[in-house]
Amino acid sequence: MSKFVFLIPLLPFVGFLINGLGRNFLSRMLVNIIGCGVLIASFVISILVFREVSAPGFTASAIDYFNFIKAGGLDIKASFLVDQLSALFLLVITGIGSLIHVYSTAYMKEETAPHYARYFAYLNLFVFSMLLLVLGSNFVVMFIGWEGVGLCSYLLIGYWFGNASYNNAAKKAFVMNRIGDLGFLLAIFWMLSQFGSIAYADVFTKASTAPVAVLTGITILLFVGAMGKSAQIPLYTWLPDAMAGPTPVSALIHAATMVTAGIYMIARSNVMFSLAPISQHLIAIIGISTALLAATIALKQNDIKKVLAYSTVSQLGLMFLALGVGAYTAGVFHVMTHAFFKALLFLGAGSVIHAMHHEQDIKKMGGLGKKLPITHITFLIGCLAIAGIPPFAGFFSKDEILIAALGKSPILYALGIMTSVMTAFYMFRLYFLTFSGTFRGSEEQAHHVHESPLAMTFPLMVLALLSVVGGWVGIPALFVKDAHLLAAYLSPVLTSQTAEGHHLSHSTEWTLMGILLAFILLAILFSKKLFGKQFKGENTTEGVPGFLANKWYVDEIYDAIIVRPINGLAAFFSKIIENKIIDGLVNGVGKGVQFSARQMRLLQSGQVGSYILIMMVSIILFFIFQLFWKL
Amino acid sequence: MQVMPINYYIFLSVALFTIGIVGVLTRRNAIIIFMCIELMLNAVNVLLVAFSKMHHVAAFALDSSTTAGTEAQLFVFFIMVVAAAEVTVGLAIIVMLYRNIHAVDINFLNRLKH
Amino acid sequence: MHINEILFWFLTALALFSAMMVVFSKNPVHSVLWLIMVFISITGHYIIMNAQFLAIVNMIVYAGAIMVLFLFVIMFMNLNAESEPQKSKWMKFAAVLSGGSLMLILIAALKDNVGFISSVHGEGSIGLIKNLGKVLFTEYVVPFEISSILFLSAMVGAVVLGKKEPSNTVS
């Protein structure tokens, strides 16, 4: 099957070309068939590849296609690596991608013809880039995909380019990603100079020979790249703004796939990270801080997509915590389950927004449960999954992360529990405000609220099913011995450092799990009490709540300490350097030429005699030079 | 046969040429200037013929049937041809000039600027 | 002293003196006449060097045709000594200075480089009309014909320039 691997990214690319070039004359039906068809075909091939990879006795090997860069000793090949990790990501990307494409056909119905095709072209291009990212067998191919998804993210956030603030959001996302990408790029160069190659196989086998300081430097730079792409402190502020894009885009790019690229990258280079404990500590600290910060902000947001966005940032933080404590399997596991339930929640939110005619403020919703039954049930499943209620998917992955964190440090564990409890609270706040109580919108909206078409509800149902059963591939040893299928599956790729986590006695684990569950249930009940019946408004202006509602004023701080000084500097350059010095130089040269020309013109007296005299003198001088200086 | 150093002809030629230059520089009458240019041309001609002869005599000592030096004399002939043509056009221009500004003074030529 | 040597010195002195007089005589007509003297003495030099063809051409074309043309133009314009304004003293001084220094430089340059004694007067018949004519009409026939075209165009040019323009006369 591996000889067809190249088709997996190629098909979306072909779809992008057809839809992008034919956007003016392809019919809507044709765009749907091409846009969704290529992805479903990729998905089918991915399943076949996955079957092959998961068969016993499979050994991963890079498939070379052509030389990308070959100069001297440098040899970078365009080649793909299909192993357990990339096959898993292939499934997630193409699977969820297909569902979201199908969903989009209904969600984007109101768009006019060329824009509709443009949307699908971008979406296909995104999937192509993402597949390139996970399939590459060296860091350069990964970087190409990495940049590609950044570009598509920019294009799709600014999809409605008529709106200036959306464009600003797109720019913000792009610039912040760029900062991270610089780190990634530097890491690539460093690896190149240290190991002489950037193919995974070479780098990882040589990693143990490199000094720890170098490895620490490389891994921190890689992590800077991951910070940008996966929205970690301090580069996370673009993700909430990225909600300006269409909701399916938020589901696909900014929840399920692109933002997990950083986790994929670190999991992929786990060999290096395991050798650099300082980087790991940094990752764990940044991860848990991001998780906590975003969770607190999410408590007070009123935009349905903003809540989900901060929740995504928070969950990504948890994933980085897992990577930081060495539980790579748990991190990847959470990527997978999070992809399921967060895509579900975003698509559910999209369904609500669709029904409410693009109203996103949850203060104006309420009581939608009866009118949108399918959305209601699936959204509830999503909330339960993210809150970590057994037996939903989120429970297993989150529990694994927390246990691994406990293995490293009780503080990380405690903070992780705080995050989980807050997650449960704000998700159910969102759920109750949206679906229960009474409707708070206008009469007209109430009249028009309707369940979404099948093209939208079908992906919801599939994702809801996955959110229920998705976690069962990673049942901890606590329940059933040797039932952690995912860990067994990924073991050839990911080194396991979590062995010490299992030293805890089973009774301790049971206790901890029970306490955690109790806290989460309490949080849910508390939020039901607050928001379940009647919404009385919240304090969002003063004190701690106001502080949280304003997102810790991080945007304002960035504005003050980075944006303003740079603007000031730019103004200085444009006013002083540009106007005075550079223009002065240019004008000065012009003036100098004019002035000297005015002086030189005096020589052109029109007196033939003086001309001849000058000629004579010059001839004499030439002779003198020729004779006596022997030039 | 008498031996005559080539230097004498060089100095004669340089002297004539310099007198021509001094004439060009000191006089304002365009016709005189023109005549001085003719003088300089002739100085060059004399030199060319002298070198031709020198060359020929040197070659003749080795081979009595040589024609070395012929080219220089023909060159002088062509210089005279061109000079004659030049004089024709030059004088026509001077006549034209005189008709326009009623003088052959080159200091008035700066009117061409305007 | 050989007769050639006597002739050389005499013709040289005549040429230089006549050239001086060309430059310094006030009357343009005198200048023309002195120039004819220069040409005659140069013709004499040609004869000493046995360049008979050039001697004849120089005499006929330069001293004859060209100088007559000059004389004709000067008389046609009715120029005399008083009509020519003099240049300033400084200009004359600068001119003589630069001319003199040019001569010095040239002599300084040539004195060392061509300091050998070489026979100029002597055997040889290349300057005879017969020999030069043979070469001219065999090897150099194309340039010769081209020079006739040059003459033709010069003639046409002179006629065009000399034609009175009906409107563009500045009074």
Image (tube, coloured by chain):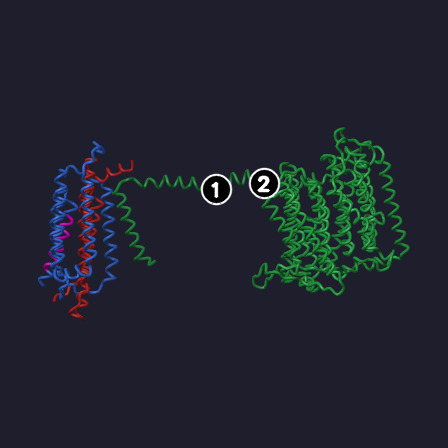
Chain colours: A green, B red, C blue
Please give the name of the residue rendered at 78% of the width and 34% of the height, measured from the top-left corner.
A365
Q: Position of residue A570 (x, y in %)?
A: 58, 40
Q: Please, what is the dominant secondary structure of the magenta stretch? A: helix
Please give the name of the residue rendered at 13% of the width and 64% of the height, measured from the top-left corner.
C125
Q: Of A298 and A350, which appears nearest the observer? A: A350
Label 1: element kind: helix
Q: Write the start and end of the magenta stretch as one range.
A: C6-20
Q: Amino acid at mark 1?
A: Leu
Q: Answer with the quarter of the image where residue C136 lies.
A: bottom left
Within 10 Å of the Cα at label 2, are there few (<14), some (14-19), or many (20+) other Cα atoms? some
| Between marks 2 and 1 in the image, the one whose residue lies nearer the viewer | 2
Q: Of A259 and C131, which appears nearest the observer? A: A259
Q: Which residue is mark 2?
A: A570
Taking A384 as reference, is A448 above or below it? above
Q: Of A348 and A331, which appears nearest the observer? A: A348
Q: Which residue is mark 1?
A: A585
Within 10 Å of the Cα at label 1, are there few (<14), some (14-19), or many (20+) other Cα atoms? few
Q: Chain of mark 1?
A: A
Asked if the magenta segment contains residue C10, the reply would be yes
Give the farthest residue toward the bottom.
B62
Q: Position of residue C152 (x, y in %)?
A: 18, 48
Q: Position of residue B20 (x, y in %)?
A: 20, 49
Q: Of B6 and A542, which appears nearest the observer? A: A542
* Residue A611 visible here: yes
Mark earlier in primary sequence (2, 1): 2
- Distance between the alpha carbons at the discs numbered 2 and 1: 19 Å
Q: Quadrant of the C terminus of chain A?
A: bottom left
Label 2: element kind: helix
Q: Position of residue A546 (x, y in %)?
A: 77, 35
Taking C123 as reference, is A114 above or below it? above
